Each structure stands twice: as structure tokens, then as C-alpha cells.
Amino acid sequence: MIHSLFLINHTGDIFLEKHWKSVISRSVCDYFFEAKEKAVDPENVPPVLQTPHHYLITIYRGKLFFLSVIQTEVPPLFVIEFLHRVADTFQDYFGECSEVIIKDNVVTVYELLEEMLDNGFPLATESNVLKEMIRPPTILRSVVNTLTGSSNVGDTLPTGQLSNIPWRRAGVKYTNNEAYFDVIEEIDAILDKSGTTVFAEIQGVIEACVRLTGMPDLTLSFMNPRLLDDVSFHPCVRFKRWESERVLSFIPPDGNFTLMTYHVSSQNLVAIPVYVKQNISFFETGNCGRLDITIGPKQTMGKTVEGLMVTVHMPKAVLSTNLTASQGNYTYDLATKVLVWDVGKLNPQKLPNLRGSLSMQAGAPKPEENPSLNIDLKIQQLAISGLKVSRLDMYGEKYKPFKGVKYVTKAGKFQVRT
Amino acid sequence: MMNDSLFSLVCAGEIFELKAELNSDKKEKKKEAVKKVIASMTVGKDVSALFPDVVNCMQTDNLELKKLVYLYLMNYAKSQPDMAIMAVNTFVKDCEDPNPLIRALAVRTMGCIRVDKITEYLCEPLRKCLKDEDPYVRKTAAVCVAKLHDINAQLVEDQGFLDTLKDLISDSNPMVVANAVAALSEIAESHPNSNLLDLNPQTINKLLTALNECTEWGQIFILDCLANYTPRDDRESQSICERVTPRLSHANSAVVLSAVKVLMKFMEMLPKDLDYYGTLLKKLAPPLVTLLSAEPELQYVALRNINLIVQRRPEILKHEMKVFFVKYNDPIYVKLEKLDIMIRLASQANIAQVLAELKEYATEVDVDFVRKAVRAIGRCAIKVEQSAERCVSTLLDLIQTKVNYVVQEAIVVIKDIFRKYPNKYESVIATLCENLDSLDEPEARAAMIWIVGEYAERIDNADELLESFLEGFHDESTQVQLQLLTAIVKLFLKKPTETQELVQQVLSLATQDSDNPDLRDRGYIYWRLLSTDPVAAKEVVLAEKPLISEETDLIEPTLLEELICHIGTLASVYHKPPSAFVEGSRGVQHKRLPGSAGSGESVESPDTGSAAGVSEAPPAVIPSQGDLLGDLLNLDLTPPTTTGPPPPSSGMQMGAMDLLGGGLDSLMGAGFGAPPAAMPASFTAPVSGGLDDLFDLGGGVGMPMGAYSPPKTVWLPAMKAKGLEISGTFARRAGVIQMEMTLTNKAMSVMTDFAIQFNRNSFGLAPAGPLQVLTPLSPNQSIEVTLPLNTVGPVMKMEPLNNLQVTDVHIYLYHKSHYYLHSRQVFLATWKDIPNDNESQFQIKDCHLNSDAASNKLQGSNIFTIAKRTVEGQDMLYQSMKLTNGIWVLAELRVQAGNPNYTISLKCRAPEVSQCVFQSYEAVLKN
């Protein structure tokens, strides 16, 4: 099982270590540093490393490496999932997951790690349960604590831990009972030079924010559940009912959680909201090149495309750019060679265009690689797959909650090849 | 307060200050001090000097303070064991606390204090907690057993905690069940044979029930445990599958992958024509695809596993090619894995798409990735014949880009394409030659040289090209040198007139100026070939080469089966069996996929046809040898159970050859029903005093190392030969085959005048000298006789086979020592040459040698190991021997570390000898 955890910042300093069994020397991380050195980019460090006596499994989140040391045969996914859960918990507790914030809250972090894992076995990883045992720091609470001498550690048995619904604590009370669901869809797509779709899929997620008193039992049903053939649920969802009736029936955790994720695969028709006409070329002589990008709406279902942004990783030889944007601003970062064009709202009457010349390093050969364009966009009030929630019912409690559903479509890994 | 910056500590003064604060009367101050101590500890500063002061804070009602002190204790108890004892009392008291949270905390912390002395005090509280009324305490205690086992395994066994833990598998609370399973799995890992997780249908049912209700982590433990179970029949297998499939929709990817493992394993048992089988296949694809949209680290592990899954069951993902298309901002480790899977899934249906993608990748930035993409194009060409043409033209396009590493990779793969489709794409050679100068990597240079040599007759200036390489011959890597040597010899054989000088030059460079034995040897061989028999040289050097196989990088089926059982583990990431790399698990049992519904109950069921599906796939180890088990049972070699004195393997059933003269063979035949005959006349013996061992005269000196001679067995019992008992054996001493016999007179009178006669036999054995028994043999006296043999006697094939009818003759004795197949190539060729029907497979049980020892031992008996291959965890020895009658026998011996049972496959043109060869093997190895 998980033996030790080291937190390492991106410059390679170990700033926190935790051992659940015997202490393992920090020097074990040297193997990791070696791999990190070799990989150049922190994203490219292989997640599973073998050393003579241990295995190092690493995740890279928020410019931090979470490095776990294991000694026996353990499912690596289990470790990786757990590490992500640790990062999520920090995020949840402290609002962000960064070196500074972890150092500021080192004792809470230590207490959390102790609660989350026992002898390498996960103990309590549900944020609800953890929050009952270790209260998240707030300014108000620390003032109160200093005045009254009370502590951040709860002294009751975490009620959720043993019931059949470990994700929900007992005795929840709200004056305003509300349940909100956000249907968020991300389009992952690769378009080729000519604009045809090489690959497209939709990653959907339903995020919920439920603040309901007592033990409500909710049922969420869809207009078109047939769209969903590939789903993963939060443990609270009753799988049997989904199988038989295609409705989501569950007792929700308290607060924010991910109810389900789904995946509309490339076999189904995935609508591509925008088209991109581009031409990036470099001349054999003269050390320069041309760039011309135009974006227009394609299948937007009548909604407005917002937050449009184009990112281009230019070849190393490109020194500077001299472009004009018909809409929005562009920047070119000389160090990272990244061109960012922030377009904003897409106006179908007047298509945004970016054109101009690229100047290259003198004497450098014509770059071989073709830069890809990365597109970012957002469409409010639309789930591009067409998924629609039809109703939300509540059983088990008497009051009437506020209910709401919001849809949004975003670009995930949306790439245009040139 | 939490937000104090606690990072400014630790110099002597501060330690002193902290000490004062820890001993303060004010609770608040104490707590802050402990927090500061913990903070320094967390960042790795040494605050162990404060041990007694911190422990003093332990007796408190404040839960947070208590927890903090516990944290400190766990960290430092090891370095201060005596001090830690001070804390024991508080622990024991806390284990009785009315608050279950405190009881659990205490038992949990005690387990983490890795001090031997403390463990003794831990036993009693732990026993109580394992039976606590509160499930929270029980589940914590379950984990504590695993901790304690890690510190002191003996203690845990003595105290009977393991049994208590087993009982917890039937606990009413699913979390307790999950933790008990987790603890047992961990303990079992250090005791591979302990059978701790003894699974039966009842426990399986309990686990399946708990599976639905426990936490995600518990589900992983339970699923991994389930995967070790082997269902009794296909019906049970199906019902488990049905109950596991809902886990495929879990948000936790580790749960999903563990569920995939269980399903992949149990699917093996389902009949393929079952509707459910198809449904299950369909259900497996979406979760695997979903794993690919997770974080890159998860993707990586998922991809490594998918790589295994598509090799075992390509049908699951055959329509999902597109999800493996690479995005430019994928981390490099994900890109490379995706590429691998794309090639595995490539088929005629999707090849156009795949090629378009690969071509796209070949223009990316990352060099490693580009290289692999170019190689992938070549692999596609070899895999999908219809696409070869398109692949070649794609590669040519890439060569036109003149990007150095792209060109080199392209040339390497074009060489492979030539080997797969000879005489088809030679038109591109001209283009390749244009790039000769830009090649700087050995592999590409070697590939280019090979192409020039192979097609020398079509390249007008082949001699110039090769000559240009020759200039820097000594600076080239071995690979290039060898290739260059061969290529020039090929060139010479094709165009002898103008290249004589060149070939002499390269031969002298290779033989006289090189220190590399490989190169020198090859040079000499060519030289000799060319100088003695140019026609033969032509036949050898320009021989038609076998086509390269389609997929060279497939994982060996046996290994693949084992890895499928380890889906989701480190083994699946490294594609190695756990025994190959997990520390301390030398005894790990190799997991195998369960057999299909072919055996057992379903034999009676009408659908046995489907059973052949799995059992038809025996571990094919020699490439392209499909069917090892093939005709094993048709060989008709199974010896009848004889009751005679020699072991049943003796092959006594054939009665063609007399060992000891006329009537004796019928005597020997007694074991299979021939009536006992009278003592043969040739054995009348005048007996006088004891003769010394003749044995030593022939033996002893110069005995080949490790040569084994089987112990003597009774060939002729006294009662059947008028009181003369003969026991004997065959041995090879100082290179001479000898028959060693002990003659015992059990009759009442003296025996004299011994003589011996050999009948014709399969091995041409005949006495090389007269039987020398000079003295009479008096009653109850024994005499040792050694008879040298030669193999020049008349050879007669025995039917149904075998050797000397009298005995279990061990053929290995007769191999001529200097005959063995000298190279892998010849071996492989011969192996393939012999029809599969002649192959037979045997098991050698309970042999505790490792492969090297076995190889040495066999070599002592003139069985030579030609090649050894280690396929993780299994050593394959390829061996050959030649019997004195000129029969070659090829053997493949599979030795698995830690497994006393060897598998041996024999191939021989005369399949009748296999059985005997096998017996010899067994005898040699067990001796």
C-alpha cells in the first residue's frame, strides 16, 4: 500500500513528507529528479517509476508533484486516484492547492493526511466525512477558537463513515433548501487542415450543489437519456434504477459534488460549433512567414459563442509577429513561442480575422513542423449533445426546495491542425 | 492558530523555548507548542529531543491535542523506544474509552508505533477491538493486524489474529469486510503460499454483497481479491460477472480497472456462443474509453492495460480507433502508448485513417514521438498487406522532407518492408540511395547497407556505395561492420568480376584487423566458404530468407495470460510478471487464466464445441509453431504399466533384441506376459572367490563432469534365471559407452563361463570386447562387470520402438559428444522442418534445479543447450542431441523459477524415440 508521500514543487524542493509506515529517506526522490531532468517539461515526467527497492508514482497538479512511494504490488490507478483525491481535498479545504497555502496550513495538512490514510489504506476520503473530523480553517473560526479555546478537530464519531451512505452526514439543516445542477459539456476534437473532423467527442459532467435539510431522496430524469451510453456515477447513484428506468435516483451528499460524468463518443454525431480557416506558411527565403486565421460559426444551435480564444504554439524559429486582429487582442510570448489571440464574442455578421507576417531568426531553416491551433470557447445555455434534464423530484422530506439546472458547453481539447 | 507561519524554527534556543511552552500550564499554549513541533517535524527537522515533553501532553481530554501527540509519537517512537514505553499505559487506557473514536484512534496509533517492545502490550487491546461492538473500531483494528504483522509476523500468527481476521470477512458491516480483505491481501503478499484468502462460494457471496455497499477503496480491494478466485463452472462465472459489471460505471478509475480485470478473467470460462458473452464484450468498451478522458497519469496506466487487453481480445476495442488519436498537448508518455495501440488496432478497415494520422504525427516536434510514428507506418505495412503500397509511398514522402531522423527511421522500416514483401518495392531504392550521406545512426546505416547488399544486382554503383562505407570501417559500430561484411560478400557473389578487390579488403579488415570475435568468425567463415566452394557459398549466403513475421512485438501468450490476471497492477504497467520485479515475492504464484468451459461439468453439456476455443491455444513458444500439444496423445507412446522391476518407462514391450543371448529376452519379457524361461546356457558360470571391482577399471578416470548414470536396476531376477540375478545400467565413462552389470549368484551352486551376446538394436550397440568374468561365481557372491560397448553394430529399427528391451536404456548416453546443432538458426530451421505431428510434450515433476544447473547437468550427458531465452519468469532452453543411430532430437525445456515442474517439448523425425528421450531427461535431471 502507499508507504510515503512527498510533496515537491516544480523547482524540485521537497517541502513536505509524510510516512504511513516506516520512514523512507528523501534520497528515494533522487530517481524522480533524474527522470524530471530528462523529461524537461514537468508534464512529461512518467507517472510510474521503478527504483531498486521502491516504486514512485507521481501526479503533477497545480505546479506541484505529489510523489508517493510504494513497496509492494499495488494497483497504480488506486494510488493515482488517491493522490488526486488528496489534491482535491486540499483544494476544497484551502481554496487552492499551492505550495504557499500548504505551507501555511501545514498542521491541518498533516492531520488530513493522517485521516485519509491508515497504514497505507484509505480511511476517509469523502470531503463530508473529513470536514466533520477536521474543520476547514476560516478566519471566523480561528477567531472563535482563540477566544473560546475550542479546537478544529471534531470530537464526535464521523456519522457518515459507517452508515450505508457514507457520503452524507446526518442532521443537515438549512433555512434555504436548494438543489442546483450544472450540465457542463466539453468538446474534444481534432480538425484537419481542410476543416474535416478527424475525431470528436463530448465529455460531459453534471456538477451538483445540493443544500437540503435532512435525508432527501432525489430523482433526476432526462428528456433524452438514450444519449448516455457511457456513464460513470458518484457512488450515491442507484445503478439498478439507471439500468432499468434510465433515471438518476440518489441520496445526495451535502454541498458540491460531481453527480455523474458521461461521454458521447465519436460514433454519435458531435456538433462542431465553429469553423476555422487558417493559413500559416513559411517562405523558403527571406526568413518570414504569413499567418491568416478566420473563425466563423458552424453548428451553434442558435446560441452565441463566447470566450473565443486561439492559442498557437509557434515553431522555435519564429522571432516575432506583426499581425492585425479585426477583433480582440493578441499577444506573442517570445520565451514560450505561444501566440494567444483573445477574440471574445463571435459575431456571425463580421467574422473575426487575424492576419499578418511572422519574422524568423535569420539563417534558420524553414521549420518542419506545422503549429496546431488550440481553440477555446464557451456557449451558455446549451449542452451541445442535446442532453436535457426533464425534471427533478424529491422524496423523503416535506419542504419544497429551489431547483435549478444550467447548461454550458466549452471547448476541451479542441485542436485544428495546419 | 492555524495560519502562523511555522517554518522559522529549530535552533537550540527555539527547542528550549518550545520545551518551556510544552510544560506550560495553559492548555492553549501547550497545543500551540505541539503544533509548532509537528510543523517542524513535517518538514523534516529533527525535534526528537522534545520527546518526553510531548509525551507528557498525551493525557488530555482534548481530542485535537491527543491526535497531535499521537502524530508525533508515530514519527519518533522508533528512535526513542524506551521513552515510547511511557506512552503505553495511556494507549491501553484509551482502548477502553467509551468514545469509539478514541478507541479506534488509540488502536490505530499503537499499530503505527513500530517498536517491538510495544507490540506485546498491543495484543490484548487489539483482541478486544477486533471484537468491538462498534464497526468503526473493528475496521480500524483489522488494518492494525496488518500493521502488526509487518512488525512481527510470528506474534500475529501465535496470537491467532489471522483467524479472527478471516472471521471478519463474514462481518455484517461492509466496511469491516473490505478492510479485512485489504489486510489479508497485504499479509498474503508476504506469505504467498499461506492460503489466507481461502475463497469458496460462500465467502464470494459475502464479498459480492459487501462490494455494493462499501467505499470505493474497499471495492478495489474486494475486486482484486475476487480476481484470485476460480469459479467452479461457467454458470458461477457468469453470475459473478453479472454482479461485477455495475462497477464499470464507477467514477473511480481504479474500481473500473479492477472490475475489468475480474471480467476479463472470468470471461475465459464463458462459452463463446452465449448471448451474455457478447453483451459483456460490448459492455467493456465504453469504460475503457472513458478512462482515456481522465488525467494523463490515469490515462497512461489505462493505456498500458488496454495494450494487454487488445492483444488478448482485439474485438473489444476494434471500433474505437479514434479515441487513441494523439492530441498535440498529450504528455509524451501518453502519446507513445497511444501510438502502440493504434498499430495493434490497425486493420484493413481503418488503415487509411491510421496512415493519415501517422503521417500527421511524423511532422510533430517531439523527436522520439516522430521516430516512433515513422516506425509505426512501417509496422502497418507489414501488418496490413493491402496497405503496404500506401505505406511505402508515405514513407517516401517523408524521406523527401530530408529531416535527418525521419529519413533514418524511414530507411530502417523500409528494410523491414523489403523483408516482408521481397521483389515488390525495389523501385524505391534509388530514392534511398540519395540519402546515403545523411545517415549517421548505426541502425540506419546497417539497414541501408543491407539493402545495397541484398539488391546489389540492381544497383549499378553498389560497389562504389559499399566502398564508401568501407573507408571508416573501424569506426563503425559492430552492427554496421557485420552488415557491411555480409553485404560485400553478397555483392561479390553476384558480381564476382569487378569486386574481387573489395571482398579481399573487407575480409582482411574483418579477420586481421578486428578484435571482435563475432566479426572475425564471420569473416573466416566467409573466407573459407569462398575459397573452398563458391557454389556452396552462394547457396549459403544468398539463400532465400524467411519472411519476417507480422507482429514481432506481441507479448508471448503465456506471459500475456498471466498479465491479464494482473490487470491494473504494476505488473501490467511494466508488462512483466510480478515475480520478475516485485521485491520479496519470490514465491509469487503465477496466475493463470481459468480454462474455458471445456473441462468439468460442461463436458456433458451440448456446447462443448465452444470449449475448444480456449484449450486450443497452448503456449506456443517457438514462434509460429501453433500447436504444441498437437498430437501429443496420438503418439501412442504411453508405456503400459508393467510390473517388472524396471520403472514403467522401460519400454519393455518390444521384444526384438537379446541382450544376454538367445533365451534371455523372453525372460525379460516376463513383465508383459512371456512365460519365464530357463536360464540361458550362455550364462553358465564357474564361480570362485570374489573379484574386485572391475568397475573402476573402466570408469572413474576422466569421467565427464556431471555425467549421470542411472542407478542399476534389476534386469533379470534370480528366480527367472536359475539363481543368477543381473542388475545393470549403462554409463558413459571417458567417452566410452559401457554396460555395467552386477551379477549375483543366488543359486546354491557355483557359476562359471559367462558370455554375452547382443542382438541387433535401434542404436547399433555392440560389445567392444569380450565379457570378462574370469572367476567362477560362488553362491551368494556378487561380481561387478563392465562391458565396453561401441555403436558400430547393425542398426535395426525396433517396433514399436525402443532400445534394449531389458532395461530402461538411457539414450542420452549414446549421443556423440561433438554433434550438436551449432546455431539457433539451424535449430529453428530444423524445428520448423519437422512436422508438428512429431512433437510431443511432457512434464517433469518435482525438479528443483534452476535452468543453468539443469543445462549443465544435461550437458554432462551430452545434451547441449543451443540457446537460452528468458521470457520473464520462464527460462526456455533449446537443446539438441543426436543419437548414435543418427536421429536428431530437438527439445525445448521450459523452466519456471519457483516451479518444480518443467515442461519439455520434443521434436524428432522419428517420434517414437520421444518417450525415451523424455525419460532420460527425467532421470538426468532428478539425479
Image: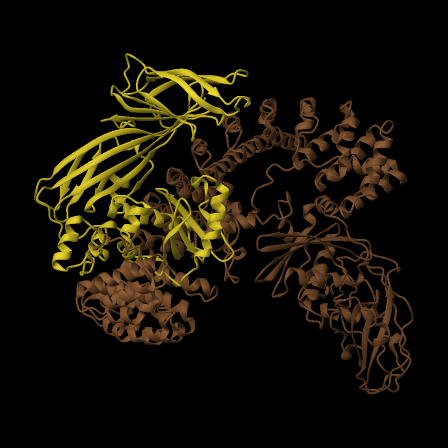
Chain colours: A yellow, B brown
> Can you see residue B602?
no
- Is residue B233 shown above or below B375? below
Q: Nearer the viewer, residue B913 or B701?
A: B701
How many numbered circles are shown? 0
Residue at the far top: name it.
A349
B483 displayed left or right of B183: right
Residue found at the far front of this picture: B13
Residue A71 position, x and y percent, is 45, 58
Write the residue at 72% across / 66% down. Answer: B650
Q: Position of residue B199 (x, y in %)?
A: 40, 61
Image x and y of residue B493, in percent: 83, 32
Q: State whether residue B234 is above or below residue B25.
A: above
**Residue B803 location, quadrant:** bottom right
Using the rendered view, name the quadrant where residue B448 is placed.
top right
Query: Seen in the image, is A51 located left or right of residue B502?
Result: left
Quadrant where the C terminus of chain A sits is top left
User: Can residue A196 be seen at all in this image of the molecule?
Assistant: yes
Question: In what quadrant of the picture does the N terminus of chain A appear?
Answer: bottom left
Image: B337 above or below A276:
below
Q: Position of residue B66 (x, y in %)?
A: 23, 65
Looking at the picture, tell me which residue is in the foreground, A122 or B619.
A122
Rendered residue at 52%/29% (across/down): B358
Left or right: B890 as drawn, with respect to B385: right
Q: Quadrant of residue B894?
A: bottom right
